[in-house]
Amino acid sequence: MGARLMLKGKWVLGEVCRIKTLASRWTKACTSGLSWAIVCLLVVLAMRPAVAHDWGGKPIVIVQGFSAGSGIDVVIRQLQEPLEQALGTRLVMEYRPGAGSNIASAHVAQAKPDGHTLLLGTAASHGINASLYKKLPFDVEADFTAVAPLVDVSNVLVINPSVIDAKDLKSFVDQVRAQPGKFNYASTGNGTGVHLAMAEFLARASLEMTHVPYKGGPEALQAVLKGEVCCIFNQVQTILPQLKSDRIRLLAVSSAKRVSALAEIPTIAESGYPGYDSGIWFALFGPKQMDPSAVKAINDAVRQVLGQAAIRERFASRGNQVRIETPEQFRQTVRLNRQRWAEVVKASGASID
């Protein structure tokens, strides 16, 4: 109740500011003969949430397939308050980590399609997993409603120099190639974008390393910092706080272009592997046949929030780029993403029974 009152209080304060902005207009309207009935209508409209939908006083539960503090959690937490204000209801986070987000995906696939249960999915959960796992209890397209993408995410190859003392990508490749099978690399879980980014690179460079999956970003990064593994393709946004640490070194980013937040770090493509591009996205999905009104309300709210200059700049400063699409456009993105990752999985030879 306290959280609900706090949210409501914040929302009302925001609406008061909107009403003050309209005050002079109302005064002019009254003096020019505009009826008080129209003025009252303006007041009512100003007091409504930015996106109209009746949520029945119930929150929207966003299910994540990773642990709290992971890169995907960082993104949704940055959007939580503005989305709550735009939607007029609370967002509640629920964590169901494991199996490359398949546990969370399976839960949402069986949820009631009323818009109150969403999956915070990724290009991995709805692209990679369909090819990587031989058996899934759901279809990543048919059993979900593509609601709205959030951001495109860049990864960076992070090493612990006490485990593998490479100065650049060429030095890294030379050392791994000279000792096949010696080095282990971490990921945020089987089938995640972090896993396949490395698997794709190893295939391109003809390298042999051992994959060690963890339940989420914090655990995987700690494994690198402790020297349990040599390296990881880590999300740029989660590595930024560690830049001053002497226990890590950044070699190359996985995106096609350099990332503004790490402008001095080259891409893998320009470091000898042209065409390499292994970025991913985060997005919201609902169960199949989700209430169209709820889909529209959430997509409208997401696009409204991501359209704000301050939000866009904040994400860019952390290595992410907002992705704004309608539900129809996003469905096509999911389909193409699934096809693209199927090719990567086949080329890399990655497989999970």
Image (cartoon, grey):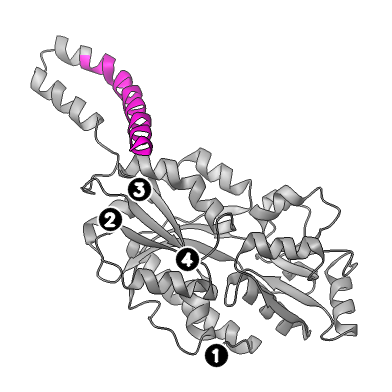
Q: Earlier in the sequence, mark 1 or mark 3?
A: 3
Majority secondary structure of the magenta segment?
helix
x then y, percent, for residue 172: 85, 72
Q: How crowded is mark 1: few (under 14 residues within 10 Å), some or many (20 or more)?
A: few
Element type at mark 2: helix
The residue labelled by disc 1 is 353
Label 1: element kind: loop
State which quadrant residue 16 falls in. Answer: top left
For the residues bearing labels 3 and 2, Cβ distance under 8 angstroms? no
Circle 2 or circle 4, nearest the eye? 4
Mark 4 packing: few (<14 Cα in 10 Å), some, or many (20+)? some
Q: How many marks are shown on the rendered structure? A: 4
| Residue 274 drawn at (x, y percent) | 72, 74
Q: Does the magenta stretch include residue 49?
A: no
Q: What element carries label 3?
A: helix
- Seen in the picture, residue 238 relative to 22 is either above or below; the reply is below
Dot 2 surroundings within 10 Å: few (below 14), some, or many (20 or more)? some
To which residue does mark 2 refer? 296
Between the C-alphas of marks 3 and 2, the distance is: 8 Å
Q: How far apart are marks 2 and 4 (CA)?
A: 26 Å
Q: Is residue 21 magenta?
A: yes
The residue mark sitting in front, 1 or 4, is 4
- Give the Cα separation between the discs numbered 2 and 1: 37 Å
Choose between 134 and 301: the one closer to the eye: 134
Residue ID for mark 3: 301
Report the magenta residues as a range. Answer: 1-26
Label 3 is placed on what type of residue?
A: Ala
- Of mark 1 and mark 4, the one earlier in the sequence is 4
Q: Can residue 251 be seen in this view?
A: no
Residue 303 rendering spot, x and y as whole percentages: 39, 50
Q: Mark 4 points at which residue?
A: 96
Question: As shown in the figure, which amino acid type bears the numbered disc 4?
Answer: Arg
